[in-house]
């Protein structure tokens, strides 16, 4: 299964970060990027853009995967609530609420993926103007 998003194509679903990065935590990540910017060479600029692209595309892939799963859960719960509506009304209401929450989370993760993509595009232009 492939997920298409803007110019990206992701293969399969992904729910956590697995890539190996040269940092272990957020402080080392910040120092790594600061050192690349400080040295100000074309090689470091390309390296910086490559790491930003890799990190952001991984975040987008995770957000889209979560959005897809919550969309499936929402549809499944909605169908299940419709099936049991006439035999067990209160259960159908609870499952309907779960469906609405899953649908809300689907839109939240889709919005997060859009936000990550727009931040990546802004960061590209900012790095190109600075370096």
Image (tube, rainbow, N blue to C red):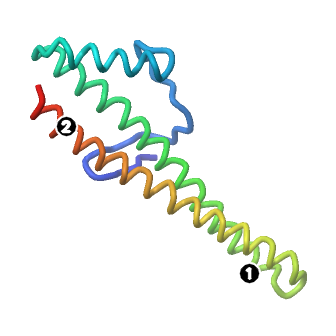
Q: Label 1, label 2: how many angstroms apart (C-alpha)?
A: 47 Å
Q: Secondary structure at mark 1?
A: helix
Q: Secondary structure at mark 2?
A: helix
Point out the tag, 1 or 2, that comes first from the N-terminus.
1
Residue 23, image x and y in percent?
44, 14
Task: Give the residue at x 77% y 79%.
Answer: 83
Q: Is residue 42 left or right of residue 30?
A: left
Q: 69 or 123: which is nearer to us?
A: 123
Task: Give the residue at x 68% y 74%.
Answer: 78
**Residue with the most extreme bottom position:** 86
Q: Classify 108 as above or below 3.
A: below
Q: 54 or 130: which is nearer to us?
A: 130
Q: Quadrant of residue 39?
A: top left
Q: Is residue 76 left or right of residue 20?
A: right
Q: Is residue 72 left or right of residue 97?
A: left
Q: Do residues under tags 1 and 2 come within 8 Å of each other at their CB atoms?
A: no
Task: Give the residue at x 68% y 69%.
Answer: 99
Q: 35 or 84: which is nearer to us?
A: 35
Quarter the C terminus occupies: top left
- Count neighbours of disc 2 (C-alpha within 10 A) and say few if under 14, some if 14 to 19, many if 20 or more: some
Which of discs 1 and 2 lies nearer the camera? The answer is 2
Task: Give the residue at x 29% y 50%.
Answer: 118
**Residue 124: which disc?**
2
Residue 21, image x and y in percent?
42, 17
Q: Is residue 75 left or right of residue 21?
A: right
Which residue, given by chain and number where applicable, does mark 1 sit on? 82
Q: Classify 120 as above or below 94.
A: above
């Amino acid at each position: 299964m492939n997920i298409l998003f803007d110019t990206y194509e992701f293969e399969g679903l992904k729910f956590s970060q697995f890539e190996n990065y040269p940092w272990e935590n957020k402080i080392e990540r910040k120092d790594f990027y600061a050192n690349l910017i400080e040295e100000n060479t074309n090689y470091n600029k390309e390296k910086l853009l490559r790491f930003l692209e890799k990190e952001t595309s991984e975040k987008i892939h995770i957000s889209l995967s979560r959005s897809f799963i919550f969309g499936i859960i929402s549809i499944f719960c909605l169908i299940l609530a419709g099936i049991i509506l006439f035999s067990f009304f209160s259960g159908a209401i609870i499952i309907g609420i779960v469906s609405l929450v899953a649908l809300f989370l689907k839109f939240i993760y889709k919005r997060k993926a859009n936000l990550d993509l727009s931040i990546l595009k802004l960061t590209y232009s900012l790095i190109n103007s600075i370096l």
